[in-house]
Image (spheres, grey):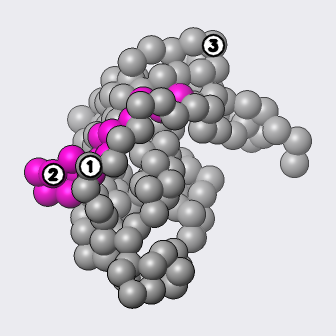
Amino acid sequence: MTQMNIRQVMDLLPHRFPFLLVDKVLELVPNESVVVQKNVTASEPCFQGHFPDYPLYPGVLLLESMAQTMAFVTFGDANFERKPDSVYFLAGIDKARFKRQVVPGDVVIIKTRLLKTMKGAAKFESEAYVGDELACSATIMGMLKEVER
């Protein structure tokens, strides 16, 4: 079981502010599962417009947070070898359900489990919690692709 601080997270994920949506890896079992933490703060840019009188973390950003967790589970797998010109893309979302609103001050714990891998692609089950309450669940798929820079 491995933990990662924000510097280690930034070494693995290409995202940067305001789109780096994972703050800490709490538990990691490579090629199996990951548990991460996302701190939702009132200073995040999304709250300027979503919604100023009732700040609510957008569901699409919660799903993006969940999608970013895929990289931690699969990097290290031979099918997901990191190359300088490769990027791990979100390839699909199925069965997304929102059960609880996420607001400034919430600490979101995301639990993601690998379901299966195919050549350069993987499918995961992911759940986001605030405390003991399920906020969102989804089946997500990622794909590693080489890109021109």
Label 2: how many Cα within 10 Å (few below 14, some 14–19, many 20+): few
* Residue 33 at x, y percent in the picture: 32, 30
**Mark 2 to mark 3 CA distance (whole Å):** 35 Å
Asked whether residue 30 is in view, the answer is no
Mark 2 or mark 1: whose residue is earlier in sequence: 1
* Residue 8 at x, y percent in the picture: 44, 55
Kind of residue sitting beneath label 3: Lys
Q: Residue furthest right?
A: 148
Query: Which mark is in front, 2 or 3?
Result: 2
Whether the magenta-drawn stretch holds residue 66 is answered as: no
Q: Which residue has dot 2 on it?
A: 133
Depth check: give the residue in front, 120 or 127: 127
Asked whether residue 138 is in view, the answer is yes
**Mark 2 to mark 1 CA distance (whole Å):** 8 Å
Mark 2 or mark 3: whose residue is earlier in sequence: 3
Q: Residue at x 49, y 58 (%)?
A: 61
Q: Residue furthest left?
A: 132
Magenta region, residue range = 127-141
Whether the magenta-drawn stretch holds residue 139 is answered as: yes
Instruction: Say left or right for 26 vs 125.
Output: left
**Mark 3 to mark 1 CA distance (whole Å):** 33 Å
| Image marks 2 and 1: residues in contact by CB distance under 8 Å | yes
* Residue 76 at x, y percent in the picture: 50, 27
Q: Which residue has dot 1 on it?
A: 99
Kind of residue sitting beneath label 1: Lys
Numbered mark located on residue 119 in the image: 3
Name the secondary structure under disc 1. loop
* Residue 36 at x, y percent in the picture: 32, 49
Q: Residue at x 35, y 41 (%)?
A: 97
Label 1: how many Cα within 10 Å (few below 14, some 14–19, many 20+): few
Query: Which mark is in front, 3 or 1?
Result: 1
Name the secondary structure under disc 2. strand
